[in-house]
Structure formats: structure tokens, C-alpha cells
Amino acid sequence: MPTSIKQIEDLSLNAWPSHKMELYDGWILRFSYFYTHRTNSVEQFGEESLPWSEKIPFCEKEYQRLGSPAIFKISPLVSPNFDFMLENRGYRIEHVTNVMTLDLSKAANLSPFPQVTFLDGIPAAWVQALFSLKQVTDPTHIQVVPSMYQAIPKETVCACVMKNGKIAATGLGILDRDFIGIYAIHVREDLRKKGLARQIVSGLISTGQKKGADKAYLQVVEGNVPARNLYESLGFIDYYQYWFRVQPVGSRKMQHPVGGLLST
């Protein structure tokens, strides 16, 4: 059976849990102190009975209570009329993202991966290294996000490259059904363009195949040309695009429920 957009969206939800989640009339409200748009947004996943004119204000109030702007994920599964309604409410588009897929039997230009180390589980040191590579300094994120990684319900393949005893590049594969999702590909800035990302992705693909995966998917933000070039060279092709509509909140600052400030 051909892969559906709904299947990839389900896999993505499984792969990256939020800190808090609320079900509401066929929608899921995800909240993670604004760590990422994906984990801090509303996704539509099932049948609904209430009108949008009632549901959108409800979501706005919920996110306001939690100290965040309301964010809605817009994929091809969402009615264009819903996107237009958010546009008319002043919601802006952020983080346009391309979902790419790969039939692993057609993977091309995989490289050997002698520098890649595979780790058991998702160690705390790996998460802390990822924070460093992404320049994450928000104390709330540092406190909360490790538990989100530990909450991933699927089998994971955690990868890294070590330099001088420290993690200098990361990657994460998440196995679900016959797919491996490719996540968290980051390389220390001074080591980029040296083939480390190719080694990590090649290692994740090869390990996924050994564990029974025959397809892969990943997400790349529009405009990330180096990442896109790498993935295309490995055989990944565009499947669909999604983006986020973010509530207009101007320059207001909202109080985090656990302390810090969320600047928008």
C-alpha cells in the first residue's frame, strides 16, 4: 500500500512527544514551553463536530493560560479554508517545512560511517550535547526537554560523532512500523562540510534496514539548502509541505508557568 500523508503525520506524532497534550474534538493541543513549533502546536487528527469559530478561541485561551501563543500546524490534511480563517485572524506563517521520503532500496551515495558511534537509549550526555549544538540556553527547556526524549514510545537509534572526547555531531533514528524517521541531525559549526552529517544519516539508514525498516522520512525547514542538498543526494524526494500559523502577539512577553519568560 502506498504511503499516505496521514501515515507520515501519525509517525511524526509518535516520534516527538510534547511535554503536555490535550485532546479536543479531533484536535490535539501540544505544549512544550515553545521549544519547537511541532511540539507546541495544534494538530488535527480526527473527526470533529464543533465549529472552528468556537474551537480557535478555545485553543487561544488554553495556550495563553500556559504562557504561549497559539500555533496551528497546517498540512495537506487540513482544509485550506481553515488556513484562510487563521490568516484573516492575523496569524502569520512560520517554519515552512518539507517532508521528504526515501525507499531504502533506492538509497544512493551512502557513505561508510567509521566515525559514528551508536549509543544505547538516549543518554543525558547526548541531549546536553544537542542543546550545545543548537545553542539552547533557556533553563526551562534544559529542565523539561530531556523528559520528552525519554518519553518517545518507539525504538530509537541514537548516533553521534566524538571529537576530543566530546560529542560534536548528533543524529536520531526513530523506528515505527516499516519506517525509520531521521531526526536531530546537527554538526558543530567548525566541523561542517566534512561529511559527518552524511556519515550519520548513512549509519542511521543502514541500522534501520538491519532492524527491518524499508522506508525513511525526514523534515527539513524551507531554506536549509545544505541539508536539502545532502538529503537529495542520498535519494530522498519531496513528498509534501507543511507550515505553522502563529497567533499575532506582537512584542508581548508571557510568563512561563514554571518561571522564565517566553519572548515572542
Image (cartoon, rainbow, N blue to C red):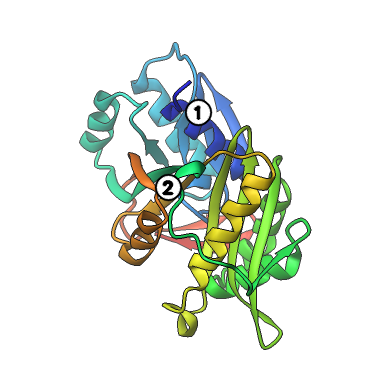
Vertical arrangement, residue 234 with respect to residue 243, above or below = below
Point 35% across, 48% down: residue: 97
Point 73% across, 70% down: residue: 125
Residue 77 in sight: yes
| Left or right: where 143 falls relative to 236 | right
Element carrying mark 1: helix
Vertical arrangement, residue 146 with respect to residue 102, above or below = below
Point 50% across, 54% down: residue: 34
Question: What x and y, as percent, mark residue 212?
Answer: 66, 39
| Left or right: where 114 falls relative to 71 | right
Which residue carries the number 2 mark? Answer: 69
Vertical arrangement, residue 177 with respect to residue 134, above or below = above
Earlier sequence position, callout 1 versus callout 2: 1
Amino acid residing under circle 1: Gln
Q: Residue furthest bottom?
A: 164
Element carrying mark 2: loop
Measure the alpha-carbon separation of dots 1 and 2: 28 Å
